[in-house]
Amino acid sequence: MSRSAHPAGPRHADVLPEGHYAAPPADLNVLDPKVWARTVARGEDGVVTVAGLPVTRLAEEFGTPAYILDEADFRARARAWRTAFGDDADVFYAGKAFLSRAVVRWLAEEGLNLDVCSGGELATALSAGMPADRIAFHGNNKSAAEIERAVRAGVGRIVLDSFQEIVRVAHIAQSLGKRQRVQIRVTVGVEAHTHEFIATAHEDQKFGIPLAGGQAAEAVRRALRLDGIELIGIHSHIGSQIFDMSGFEVAAHRVVGLLKDIRDEHGVELPEIDLGGGLGIAYTSDDDPREPQEIAKALTEIVTRECRAARLQTPRISVEPGRAIVGPTAFTLYEVGTVKPLDGLRTYVSVDGGMSDNIRTALYDAEYSVALVSRASEAEPMLVRVVGKHCESGDIVVKDAFLPADLAPGDLIAVPATGAYCRSMASNYNHALRPPVVAVEGGEARVIVRRETEEDLLRLDVG
Ligand SMILES: Cc1ncc(COP(=O)(O)O)c(C=O)c1O
């Protein structure tokens, strides 16, 4: 995005400050369907509705801040991924993006599998009835207790992340009289983010075992020797918020290269390949995500072509989208507390949440959009920074955006595309009470994760 001039003339400065903002949209009342959940619309009275419910009513009933999640949209996106990959491939929703028992039930009903990466996520999945054989267990430092629980439960696969873990899982499974299906996570020397990928030294990270230097091949050798595990495939995850498929192309090429080496050395063709998650979504109108159909076609073609060239049977493909399913389906509803114009700079809009409910802006410099949702406004656009109420100057929710210049305390604003990595990364910083997740569907709203209370906080404080 490029910096551009304010058509109506900036409100507080002759020159706009440095920032990553585009020109203000022609009409601030229009909601770009790319970034909002599918049932979101602005009513004739100017109030935004979701699943037919006015946000003003949701704020009254559930308070703010609150994550509002469009269940029909979630189910439709999950189904679209499932349908796009068909019966010859598996879609594992990445629970780290957002997990609750309701979400687990929706996934189970829509025919998806689930990737979990901690004992807590595993417990949530099992308690909501996800069949264990549809669960993949990830993580770079699973404890012995977590591994034992996963093996006992009968998870479909454990994704091994280190040499120690190969032995650990094999021993635990063997001591339980089981043979655990496993994949080995490799790093392929590719890191992809958004529109770019870099194929250099990205083995320098905590996840996976590098292909480089023959380390992954050695991991396979060791795994094939152990009775407690059955090596079923190779796993690769190359990054996040990816739009460009060329990173996957290089990753698939390298993973298939390993499968070929395994066949040549051991006479074994591993039946599965997992290409991870990381597919991008629209956080702002400038992002152009791909449809699941297009992604499925591209990935299937890449793997099939590479396998044909290596004279291998095409393995069963699996993918692990998290953000691409849940991200666009929710928005965070905030109430404006203060509007503070800084002459020559910008206007700071403080809301009743912040980095405790959305850490992504502070952590990754993530970009978001924002809109006034409790009413329409014909006022001119004003350049704003939406900030939270925490004791941290980096407590920014939306770095640069435009809101109507008549914005005032008490107005409700909403930040779209907060379904992924917001509630799941939420904290209690400043003893904030983490907001609820309210699922809306067919004119009805229900809390699926309730708001924290001061009693919740104090219950843990046992000193
Ligand atoms: C192994 C693995 N799979 C899947 C995902 C999900 O990524 P995303 O939510 O970007 O699709 C992640 C994210 O970190 C991951 O590490």
Image (tube, rainbow, N blue to C red):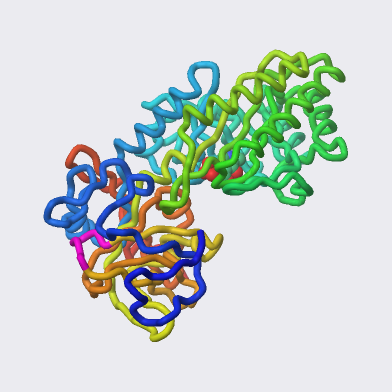
Q: Is residue 169 left or right of residue 295?
A: right
Magenta residues span 372-378
Q: Is residue 94 left or right of residue 217?
A: left
Determine whether 166 is above or below 420 in the image.
Answer: above
Secondary structure character of the magenta stretch overall: loop
Can I make out residue 428 in this image? no
Q: Which residue lies most toward the bottom here?
A: 343
Determine whether 277 is above or below 363 in the image.
Answer: above
Magenta segment includes 72: no
* Residue situated in front as seen by the camera: 288 or 322: 288
Count of numbered marks: 0
Place of residue 441 in the rendered image (x, y in percent of width and height, measured from the top left) = 24, 39
Place of residue 392 in the rendered image (x, y in percent of width and height, measured from the top left) = 48, 76
Name the residue at 76% across, 14% down.
311
| Quadrant of residue 382 within the rendered picture | bottom left
Can I make out residue 294 in this image? yes
Name the residue at 38% across, 60% down.
434
* Residue situated in front as seen by the camera: 172 or 239: 239
Determine whether 397 is above or below 308 in the image.
Answer: below
Place of residue 102 in the rendered image (x, y in percent of width and height, measured from the top left) = 35, 38
Name the residue at 45% across, 64% down.
21
Q: Quadrant of ligand 1?
A: top right
Determine whether 220 is above or below 146 in the image.
Answer: above
Name the residue at 48% across, 37% down.
290
Magenta segment includes 373: yes
| Quadrant of residue 224 within the rendered picture | top right
Place of residue 368 in the rendered image (x, y in percent of width and height, measured from the top left) = 43, 58
